[in-house]
Amino acid sequence: MRRRPDLESKKHRYHGRVYWVVKEPVGLNYYRFHEEEFAILNMLDGQISLQQIKDRFQAEFAPQRITLQDLQQFVGMLHRSGLVISKANGQGTQLRRRGDQKKKKELLGKLSNIFALRFRGVDPERILNFLNPFTWWLFTVPALIFIALFGLSAIMLVLTNFQQFQSKLPTFEQFFAAHNWIYLGITMGLVKILHEFGHGLSCKRYGGECHEMGFMFLVFTPCLYCNVSDSWMLPNKWHRVFIGAAGMYVELILASIATYLWWFSQDGMFNFLCLSVMFICSVSTVVFNGNPLLRFDGYYIIMDILEIPNLRQKATEILKRSFQKYCLGLELQENPFLPQRKQFWFALYTVASIVYRWVVVFSIMMFLMKVLEPYGLQALGRLIAVTGLAGMIIQPIWQSIKFFRTPGKASKMKRKNVLTSLGVVGTVVACVCLIPLPFHVDCAVVIEPQDAEQVFTIVPGKLVSLNKQIGDTVTKDETIAQLESLDIRSQLVEYIGERAVAEKKLEVMRRMRSRDEETAYQIKTQEEIVAASLAKEAEYRTKVDLLEIKSKVDGVILPAPPKPEPKQDAEEQLPTWSGSPFSSKNSNAYFAESDLLCYVGDPSRMEAVLVVDQHDIDLVDEGMEADIKIDSARLDTFSGKIATIAETEMQVSPENLSLQSGGRLDTEMDASGRLRPISTSYQARVPLENVEIPLRSGYRGQAKIYVGYRSLGWRLYRFCAKTFKFEM
């Protein structure tokens, strides 16, 4: 055996100890060795024997000792890793078999993670060398400070105008509509290309190399990936950390610029693309790249900060060994390559990463199914979900089967440990499936006057006067407000004229009937024209009367929920109203048909209107207790019992409950221009008595309806049934 002559090596320090990082340049593989291991590698010149290596090792590193068996195992590991060359016959066959096994392993790895598929590409060294003179300054300390402050200013812009920011956001269905998929895909692809170039250029900036840039499908979106494993050759760990964070650094720049451009631009394609950049950069950083629980940028950053290479593999091995030792009772030999201190935290890291990976995969599946559902493509979403889950389930099951089928493993297990472990697992499963715990249904809520009469604008018009104000007493048929509509009045004048002309023509025909037989046949038709004209005139006289808005009952004027500030279109001619109709700013504002003006009722009687989703309505019954918390008094909670539950679905949603207005209800605009819940929902009414918090009509918040006791197993089954459309 002899050491490959093309290997490169660099001396590093981890936790105060000397290590050597060796680069295998053909396969771009990197290995870390202790000083003693690196010395043995360098001794392999093709002539020296194992006994001679043993003698030299014990002379150089006294008082350490090594056996020929340990030495043979280490040299075998070097050979399997491709770091040494053997002169023995049959090496080509062995290398071919090893290469086939590696390709098979890579293929299985791709199939087990369909949400991040990688395909090797080209060597980007030339283009990175070309760009490096123009971009090196981005990776300096002054630039880092400036970009951090710029990003902070973008965040402050959003936080200080959060209500307005929230009102400008589109709904989920609008943002992820089918006609936007191509733009989202292109935007995500471009962002990820710049992200990967950030890694590559930062690696060049600090003296590393980059010889692999390939094609990748990240959540089925094409983009690039850049292999900067050469950063492991850099002795300065903070340079390695910054190379790992360079992609997120580039996304911070893009997101900050996009935030300002989105904020100051008008609605349109450019505005949508800026919002897409903000969404992609923020979500990918928080959920994927910045999180150390997934093997993306955050993982490599934390690995360099902790100075523990192969953190995931070592943490997983610690968890496996703990399971084998305590649950199966196996006696294991000490592994000197694993961290010896704080092993509990490494095992906990493995558990957390597994749980988080499942959470991310489930979130992606739910996201895909929600996007595909409006287009009838749920079957495609389920196929993707099953494929993704199969990759996560089959591999660990197969590894477990291989472990237990290893000859001699079963005989070494201790009966006491196995039975205890099975008992604990059985107890936990029984508790999850059988022990009932309090269960509640969450829903949006709005405060309304109880049994109050709603006062709507029946016809559209401009508000010209208010005869009453909030809190005034009103009697039946008393005028509350006056609208004016030149269009309705001009139509009335037109129909009066048409009616007069038609009547005059009918009168002439009747006079001529005795002299002209043909005219006699036309009289019936003309009479129908006169009747139609009279009907139209009567219709518009009624509309003119409806411009005067009157109360239908006796009571007190109570405020309606405030209307959110509308998005003004460039083509819009009429000023629409917002807030309260009784506000002075709404004088001469245009009111559309069916706008809610106010309530007339008893101000001492209020009720909470709960909006219950169709998936939860079967759990809710009259008489159930509901805890209510309104947004204007987040620290206070009051309770009540459900008095009535609507039998028909909710057709119109109060605007202030919409997500676009800061509420909690996902809504959409129907063909008539009214807001309605996207998911079928029902109203449940809770009379409010003896509530110390001052309440006003239109206050919104959230409610919890306590529907009894349910086990965790039942909740998990119900969640899966709702998600995958199984029948309960």
Image: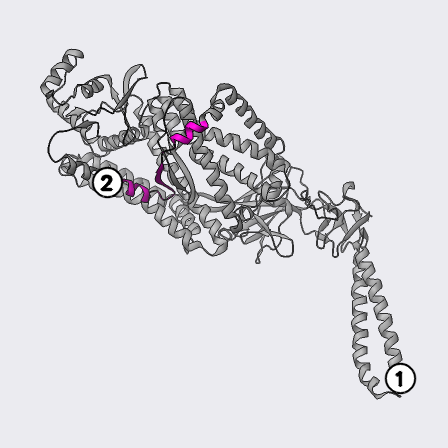
Q: Quick one: SS at disc 1?
A: helix
Q: Which mark is residue 211?
A: none
Residue 681 in picture, x, y percent from top left? 55, 53
Q: Is residue 728 magenta?
A: no
Mark 1 Cα-neighbour bin, 10 Å: few <14, some 14–19, many ≥20: some
Q: Position of residue 263 (x, y in %)?
A: 62, 36
The foreground one among 402 and 341 is: 402
Pointer 2 local density, CA inside 10 Å: few below 14, some 14–19, many at least 20: few
Which numbered dot is residue 400? 2
Rendered view: 38 above or below 85: above
Would you identify the image quadrant in which residue 690 lies?
top right
Q: Quadrant of residue 437?
A: top left
Which residue: 34% across, 28% down?
229
Q: Position of residue 597 (x, y in %)?
A: 73, 49
- As drawn, is 376 to the left or to the right of 209? right
Q: Amino acid at mark 1?
A: Met
Kindly identify which numbered label has been placed on residue 512: 1
Note whether residue 126 is visible. Answer: yes
Q: Nearer the viewer, residue 237 or 338?
A: 237
Q: Position of residue 31 (x, y in %)?
A: 27, 25
Tell me the SS state at disc 2.
Answer: helix
Disc 2 marks a residue whose amino acid type is Ser
Residue stretch rendered in magenta on the structure: 105-131
